[in-house]
Image (tube, rainbow, N blue to C red):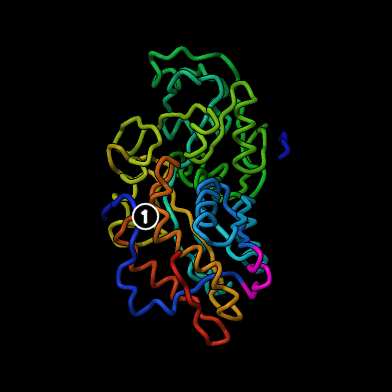
Amino acid sequence: MKFLSNSQWVPGRRRFVGLAGAAVALGGGLGSLGALAQAELRGAGATFPAKLYQRWGRQYAQSGGQVVNYKPTGSGDGVRQAIARSVDFACIDTPLSAQELSERRLVQIPTCVGGLVPVVQGFENQKLKLTGELLADIMLGAIERWNDPRIAAVNKNLPLPSRRIVRVVRSDKSGSTESVSRYLAQQSPRFAKDVGIGALPKWPGEVVAAEGTDGIAQAVKATPGAIGFVSSDRVDADGLAGVQLRNRDGQFVSASEAGFRAAVLNSELARSGQDTANLLDMPGADAWPLTQTTFVLLDALPATAASVEPALKFWYWCFSRGDNLTKGTGFAPLPTSMQTKLAGRFAQVRPQSGDLPRYQLL
């Protein structure tokens, strides 16, 4: 292994429904970090939504809120820091179970929906098509060159180079990697057996390992024949060539906000409000197969209300106003039907001091 350094969709402002009786009970934040939060809000975790969260943070500060310092250290590190109470909030891509949340005294809230995209080097002016089965065989190392007859069969009018395929993978524990491996395991029994599902799987053969989404993007651009996975917002921003994937309905589609919405609307996320619902390979002609929800973790039992109010205000602002800021970012907002449920999730934060956090929209 090589290592490199490192429901209904309504645009515009999002509104909570049914908050009149719950307003004073809303709260969030990690641990008794009042001293930390006085200077700035500190967050860490998932790289998948990092650019969006940093954009929200800049707009929040410009609106009169605190400076938000979000470091994309990976979902695995986000969980670690949430448990350690070393940041004001942490973010992850793969949701924790109800038991894990209870044991670690955390509240988990979905924030937005996005897509993971296979990106390739050498196809910058072309649209390479792949099926889930082909993608699984590529990541297994079973397909070694781009002109393999199986790839050529679904790219009949595309000249394919004989270049060797170089797999670029994350070197750190990643919720995105866990989602990718889950999708590939669904597509390929062999992948499920030989690699399985995990945030840091053991990839067969020789791969290039890079840290974080930034590392993946840079390595793919710099490596002839490379393939890797990045968040949907990074494809155009980094000048990468995204792959078209065949979805469950048999359509080859490109990653798009419309594709993420289609996946959500055909999932239990929209039907029953189950925010941990699987969004991978959902039905729908436009549905993007590698769609996922991303989450923020807050302390369920902070020491005092004052210690969590700064984080609460930021995230409440994001949920109430952040939808406008998703436009053009490669992410989609959550269905409006989830808003009442999300308001109740905020109310699960109960300071040990007995006083209730206060919030205020800026």
Q: Give how far across and how far down residue 326 sits, in percent.
A: 42, 47
Badge 1 amino acid: Leu
Against 217, residue 79 (above or below) is below
User: Which quadrant of the rendered structure holds the N terminus?
Assistant: top right
Image side of residue 215 versus residue 325, left or right: right
Q: Which residue is at the far bottom?
A: 354
Q: Give how far across and how far down residue 15 sits, in percent.
A: 33, 62
Q: Give how far across and how far down residue 351 sits, in percent.
A: 55, 81
Q: Which residues are magenta?
A: 31-39
Q: Which residue is mark 1?
A: 334
Q: Residues within 10 Å of mark 1 (few under 14, many from 20)?
A: many
Against 238, residue 33 (above or below) is below
Whether residue 223 is visible here, answered yes or no, is: yes
Quarter of the image for residue 68 reads: bottom right
Image side of residue 84 versus residue 191, left or right: right
37 magenta-colored: yes
Q: What residue is rendered at 54% in x and 37% in y?
A: 229
